[in-house]
Amino acid sequence: MNVLPTPVLLAVDWWALGAVLALSAGILLLLLLEFFPAQARSNRSAIVALLTLAAAGWSVFHVRDAKREIFGGMFVHDGFTVFFTLLFCAAGALAVLLSWDYVKRTRINQAEYYALLLSATAGMIIMAASNDLITIFLGLELMSLALYVLVGFQRHHLESNEAALKYFLLGAFASGFLLYGIALLYGATGTTGLGQMAAVMIDSPMLGNPLFLLGGLLLIIGFGFKVSAVPFHMWTPDAYEGAPTSITAFMSVGAKAAGFAALLRVLMRAMGDVQADWIPILSGLAILTMTVGNITALLQNNLKRMLAYSSIAHAGYVLIAVVAGGRDGAASALFYLAIYAVMNLGAFGVLTLLGREREERVLISDLAGLGFRHPALGIALTLFMISLGGIPPTAGFMAKVYVFSAALNAGLVPLVIIGVLNSVVAIFYYLRVTVALYMEEPQGEPVYVSWATPGVIALIASVVLTLWWGIQANGLLAAAQRSVLGLL
């Protein structure tokens, strides 16, 4: 009589692991397709990648209300996992649509490109779903190794090769910090499981243990690199500038969201009882990250580098939500990451359409007069810029409102004041783009726009969501609040 429930439980467990299984199958299929010749401008790899991401998203959505622990509790399927899995799959799908014509135009249309993109997505999902420091590290390395190669995928560009090498060297250095931190935490607690670590910390105070303190600091350094927090941000502008623009769009949102997903699960699941003791460190990181990112972005004339420093500043805003902690802080962090993904993918998506053949037009001066020659493109880029700046009625405004509200409720008034002042500074360099679009005369040959239906679809989706979540954000916020309940 006890045998009957077993197949049902196994079925749910397989479904809970469905996203990773679907992505793994898609990666293998893409590599096997290389044995069958295809036309130079074939779309089959992009179609397989898009169908794989759709299958991965559907498989986790199918069992969205189930909560399961797999592999001895190392992999967890809960609301938090579902939220981030859907976010990563959506970001990956938009990246595939933006890449559809871009990779053919720049002559990097290879199956390995999409296989690596799916591998990075699988690593992100593993990071978000991991309930053990070892699996977090494995997910991080799977994501990072794929991104290292993707950043240098334009092998004919010296800047791309240089960016990949810098990213790889600094990434390997940061991975060493993270792994050493995991080893020290294991030495202090005798476990790498987040739940077991929390139980050990309840029974015995850990703040006086030097292994625990140093391990926690090294862990923050490792995650700080992945989310581009200052002073671990040096790789960001070079990697963003040198990578193919479609990959810059994907990694700017995916890697950041994955890093914050792992950080939130570690802080709230394993270190909830001592989270207050990390507030000064995380507050200092948030202030440095916002300020350095925004001030340096003021000096940039390359739009990809400007958006790179902008992404550093946005990591600082998310850190405010992490410092706020609790249900409101964690939910506002998830809410902010989802909105940031949409508006940043849209901003980089516009850049993927500019230029012909291998040419990339990414200087702010290249945008001069573009708003009049291509009104739809100008309006879309303007919308993404004012949303990134946090101007109503866009989604970016609502994201900052919820983050600052959570911080105010937690009594972090000085941090909120600094965040608001940084937001005011940021508006200046975002509006520089709008000024170039509508108030400057083009110099030299007008910028060519490579219109492609998949890329246009991705931009339309980004525009619609940026406007919709700016007007009606309650549904997304409610989903974020439900997602973090399992961590409390």
Image (cartoon, helix red, strand yellow):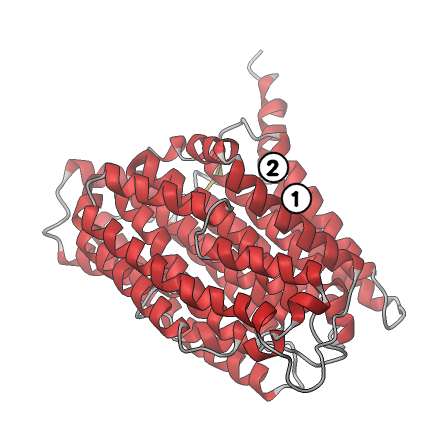
**Residue 172 seen in the figure:** no
**Residue under the point 41% across and 61% down:** 427
- Residue that carries the numbered disc 1 in the rendered image: 56
**Residue under the point 32% across and 53% down:** 319
Q: Quadrant of the N terminus?
A: top right
Q: Give the total of numbered labels.
A: 2
Q: Position of residue 294 (x, y in %)?
A: 36, 67
Is 23 left or right of 39, judged from the image as shown?
Answer: left
Q: Position of residue 302 (x, y in %)?
A: 52, 78
Q: In the picture, residue 9 is in which quadrant?
A: top right
Q: Amino acid at mark 1?
A: Ala
Q: Quadrant of the C terminus?
A: top left
**Residue 322 seen in the figure:** yes
**Residue under the point 25% across and 41% down:** 408
Q: Amino acid at mark 2?
A: Val
Of 480 and 445, the residue lying toward us: 445
**Residue under the point 59% across and 76% down:** 362
In the image, residue 191 sits, relative to residue 429, either above or below, namely above
In the image, residue 54 sits, relative to residue 437, either above or below, namely above
Q: Position of residue 299 (x, y in %)?
A: 40, 78
Secondary structure category for the residue under label 1: helix
Disc 2 to disc 1, C-alpha distance: 7 Å
Mark 1, other Cα within 10 Å: few <14 / some 14–19 / many ≥20? many
Q: Are the residues at dot 2 and dot 1 in contact (C-beta closer than 8 Å)?
A: yes
- Residue that carries the numbered disc 2 in the rendered image: 60
